[in-house]
Amino acid sequence: MGSWCSSGNRHVATEGGIPKAMTFQQRHLLDIESLTVDELTTVFDLADRFLEISERPIKKVPTLRGRTVVNLFMEPSTRTRVSFEVAEKRLSADSVNISASGSSTSKGETLLDTVRNIEAMNPQILVVRHGEAGAPHFIADRVDAAVINAGDGAHAHPTQALLDCATMRRALGSIRGREVAIVGDIAHSRVARSNMVALSKLGARVRVSGPRTMLPPHLEDFGVEIVDSLPQALEGVDVVMMLRIQAERLGNKCLFASTREYARTFGLTNATLELTKPEAIVMHPGPINRGVEMAPEVADGPRSVILNQVTYGVAVRMAVLYLLAGSPPVE
Ligand code: ASP
């Protein structure tokens, strides 16, 4: 998958550089449930356009010049935080980063007071990561700025699902009718939830698997098939999405016997990967626990598009920032 960025560019009809028939009515991006299929497609088409900008020697356009974006990260993050910041800089926005440890919440200030103070400085967009499900929705109801959910508890991670689907579309040509396996700690994964919603909307057939203790109740409501074993999940699929055990959300709960046992039962190896379609791709949102949910040779192997996901992540976030900033011209 090495020639990812420069090969297979899909043709998108454009007008002044902007994909035609752009549909996007959202004021915030809080979850995938709120988006229509046309809006999902708008983000993917626009991301393809921004991916091309990321391949240029000078990776900067003046599109969001003069706009301020505040990245409020109240939970640890590497990829998502850096990805948003790179996306903002490539669009020439002024970006400001706030983390939990460096903010006045560590001095006892409430989230609402923190946000009201940030709002008083008139940013156009707030990117919010928070350990509590619903925190970005709570903020969105109380501010004029557009709010982007960069991951809230075990609830949602919409930009991750958008970049995952964009990566799949690019690698496979289409999503409709594709078989996708999502394996691991489904119950505590916001990535799984957002992807199940997105993939069902886009017409993929999704199978999920993991230890029974890591499958949430009412999983069928997402329109997915639940299978007990890793081989059943992998049989003939086009995409394998492996997930990390969300240890930070488990508290004292002991949901599996041991890491070794988990790796033996649900860890993806080159041998189990043989069960998929020969051209199947392997995905992971990161961070990977090598040797637990995935063997290193799979993570680094020829079917892995894990780093392509990261590359696409910047383009997808540029697209989302662009759409929520009120569609200024792409130059
Ligand atoms: N980076 C993803 C998230 O923030 C996945 C993970 O942490 O396992 O949810």
Image (cartoon, rainbow, N blue to C red):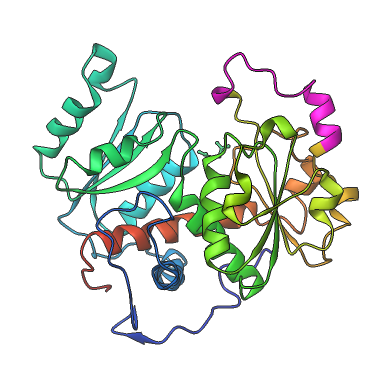
Where residue 173 appears, x then y in whole percent?
62, 76
Looking at the image, residue 322 sits to the left or right of residue 35; the answer is left
Where residue 187 appears, x then y in whole percent?
60, 36
Q: Is residue 174 magenta?
A: no
Q: Is residue 258 magenta?
A: yes
Name the quadrant where ligand 1 sits.
Answer: top right
For image coordinates 39% across by 69% down, the residue present is: 39
Picture quarter with the N terminus: bottom right
Q: Is residue 114 above or below residue 329?
A: above
For image coordinates 31% across by 52% down, the residue present is: 89
Which image quarter: residue 302? bottom right
For image coordinates 61% across by 74% down, the residue present is: 174
Where residue 74 appears, x then y in whole percent?
36, 28
Q: In this rendering, does residue 311 appear at all?
A: no
Where residue 95 appears, x then y in whole percent?
25, 45
- The extreme left residue here reads 120
In this rendered view, identify the residue nearer to me: 44 or 112. Answer: 112
For image coordinates 24% across by 44% down, the residue present is: 140
Residues in magenta, as a range:
248-265
In this rendered view, identify the residue nearer to me: 296 or 323. Answer: 323
Q: In this rendering, does residue 99 appear at all?
A: yes
Looking at the image, residue 250 sits to the left or right of residue 53; the answer is right
